Image: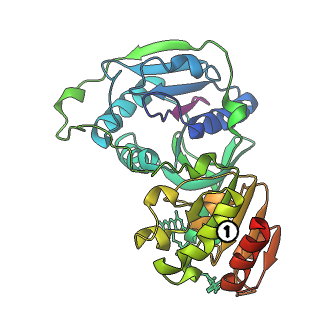
Amino acid sequence: MSNDILVLAEHDGQAVSDITFELLGAARRLASGSGGQVAVALVGGAGLTGTLGAASTVYVVDGTSGAIYSPEVFEKAFLGVLKEADPRLVLTGTSTMGIDVAGALSVAWPAPVVSYVVGLEAEGTELVATSQIYGGKLMAEVAIGGPHAICAVIAGSFPADAGRSDGTPEVREVAVAGLDSARTTPRGVHEPDTSGVDIAAAEVLVSVGRGIGGKENLEVVQELADALGAPLAASRPITDQGWLPKPQQVGKSGKKVKPRAYLAFGISGAPEHLEGMRDAELIIACNTDPNAPIFDVAHYGTTADLFDLAPELAEKLGS
Ligand SMILES: Cc1cc2nc3c(=O)[nH]c(=O)nc-3n(C[C@H](O)[C@H](O)[C@H](O)COP(=O)(O)OP(=O)(O)OC[C@H]3O[C@@H](n4cnc5c(N)ncnc54)[C@H](O)[C@@H]3O)c2cc1C
């Protein structure tokens, strides 16, 4: 049985995603203890092999250099690499791609999947994954036996810098049959309308949740955001109802943000929201419910009513 670890690379065609570097760092740590090698499977993403120096081998699937992500083609391509590389462990993200391909590969390879992983440790010859269940309300420790396994890891669980290296991996081309007989053909990629707001790049975010009550009340927090020179961000109910555009959503199905300051108004702190903002340097929460879980991650908190606090802060900052 090999001790090798294979990371399924994610990219947007231009750059490799942070989750891939996180996985590479974790893979190197685990492999160094077990004498295994770290490899990457790259489908699409021509020209990106040079950024994957933390791996000793990059498997590039022939004929996919310009491929846009599609579950059908990527599953087949990754399966071809798995058969060639025969790793002990496959690491992918709990992301759109990872969720798609982990299940399919689990059946086709075959191997068990542990998803929503936030920790991975070697205990002797065994691997132990810590994984979120019930949306992160509980953690499960899963011992992984058997010759093969797949882990889908939540973004932000490991440091991405540990997976960046200017090493020179060996590049191996893998020919996979049947990639041109897919029944689905991606036509292109459309960027959502961001209205010029990039919450992931902002140093300060004023974020608003269902406590705001209605779209007409957003003005209250918008004035504070303007006074701070910060964009507005939101929890999912706000974007689901179309009160703010989807690209301004923070969380599991939105964006992961790490601003210097995150001001949360009327946000309860559900695990899916915390997943996107808990790494902010400073978290200040305003919620009338003293038991709201947002206070578990907040550095400062107040049970003031947001309709009192936000205008007063805006006035003080504006004057
Ligand atoms: C697969 C999946 C993915 C998800 N992805 C995301 C995601 O990406 N992002 C996300 O945010 N959620 C996500 N969710 C939804 C998540 O589970 C929660 O439902 C959501 O985060 C709750 O949003 P909220 O905190 O704004 O609303 P609520 O939970 O309703 O909280 C509103 C809070 O406002 C407080 N409040 C009310 N009035 C006031 C006032 N006047 N002043 C101050 N405080 C007040 C209340 O005490 C309450 O705590 C996801 C769920 C699933 C199942």
Q: Nearer the viewer, residue 182 or 10?
A: 10
Q: Is residue 172 left or right of residue 157?
A: left
- Residue found 23% across the figure and 37% down from its top: 187
Residue 5 belongs to the span the image colors magenta: yes
In the rendered view, would you say 176 is above or below 210?
A: above
Residue that carries the numbered disc 1 in the rendered image: 224
Report how many numbered discs are placed on residues in the image: 1
Residue 48 in percent (x, y) is at 50, 21
Secondary element type, mark 1: helix
**Residue type pointed to by label 1:** Leu
Which residue ends up furthest to the front in the rendered image? 319
Closer-to-camera residue (187/229): 229
- Report if residue 238 lies within the magenta region: no
Looking at the image, residue 44 sits to the left or right of residue 50; the answer is left
Q: Give residue 227's position: percent from left, percent from top.
A: 69, 63
- Residue 82 is left or right of residue 165, and the answer is left
Q: Is residue 198 left or right of residue 312?
A: left
Q: Quadrant of the N terminus?
A: top right
Q: Place residue 211 in its image quadrant.
A: bottom right
Choose between 288 and 270: the one closer to the eye.
288
Where is ligand 1, by quadrant? bottom right
Where is residue 209, by image quadrant? bottom right
- Mark 1, ligand 1, within 8 Å: the answer is no
Instruction: Residue 100: tell me if it is visible.
Output: yes
Q: At which x and y percent is residue 67? A: 32, 28
At 51% from the left edge and 58% from the top edge, which residue is drawn?
248
Q: Residue extending furthest right?
A: 300
- Residue 131 visible in this rendered orientation of the protein: no
* Magenta segment: 1-8
